[in-house]
Amino acid sequence: MNKRRYATREDLGLRKAEFAVLRRLNTPEKIQAYVDAIPQNFEIGGETCLSVREVLGQRRAMCIEGAMFAAAALWVNGEPPLLMDLKATRDYDHILTLFRRNGCWGAISKTNHAVLRWRDPVYRSLRELAMSYFHEYCNKRHQKTLRSYSIAFDMRRLDPKTWVSQKKNCWDVGWALDTARHYPLITKRQSKLLRLRDALEREAHTLRLHKPPARR
């Protein structure tokens, strides 16, 4: 594991121009603004797990791709590159990039919806942070689906070639996050008491930052 505090360009295997982008994003707020601004990756043509280099080159990302990009930017600027996996039932997982301020956790998040977004660093534990997503984490049947959260996964455990500089899909990163230790958020008994989203919540869930492509 490369536990170096600051990732160098040589560590990451990036070109000067690519590295310069990450170095300019020297706060979580700047990183969040960047990942919000680049278009959503709607995976036209098939599923992807783009590396940081490919996110920079293709100017698109979805949650895990934006999370890896944000982690690399934090690492370049002297913060640990930590990810957290939110695991759901009958729904997709969501990946966050973690950061801490004054002992409290916050999160950078790439999403196209009005929910599951940035979190300010006010959460005293990872469980508190994960629970802040619970109410809005729903599937197309309007069921609340979030069930567990992972440890803070340090991306320095992985060779940067596997998630920063390679030009092929980073499926190994998804596998590593999926198999990391997870902690339950609710019990089976509690899950039976969950209320479906109401009409207003369903309408709010239709809001999008980037317009999806027209169906053919």
Image (tube, rainbow, N blue to C red):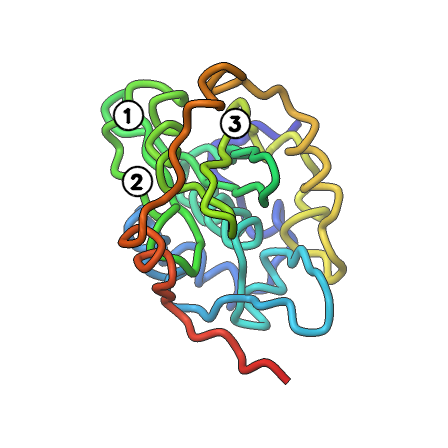
User: Helix or strand or loop: what does disc 1 sit on?
Assistant: strand
The x and y percentages for residue 73 are 45, 49
Q: Which one is nearer the viewer's eye here, 207 or 101?
A: 207
**Residue denoted by label 2:** 119
Name the amino acid, label 3.
Answer: Arg
Q: Is residue 73 left or right of residue 26?
A: right
Image quarter where the N terminus lies is top right
Give the residue number, with chain letter if any, for mark 1.
123
Q: CA distance from mark 2 to mark 3?
A: 19 Å
Front in this rendered view, residue 50 or 118: 118
Label 3 or label 1, whichever comes before in sequence order: 1
- The 10 Å Cα crowd at callout 1, few under 14, some 14 to 19, many 20 or more, is many
Up the image or down, 138 lies above or below 147; here it is: below
Q: Which residue is mark 3?
A: 147
Q: Amino acid at mark 2?
A: Arg
Label 3 SS? strand
Give the mark toward the camera: 3 or 1: 3
Tag 1–tag 2 contact (CB < 8 Å): yes
Image coordinates for residue 209, horizontal then vertical, percent = 36, 67
Q: Residues within 10 Å of mark 3 (few under 14, many from 20)?
A: many
Q: Gap between marks 1 and 2, in whole Å? A: 9 Å
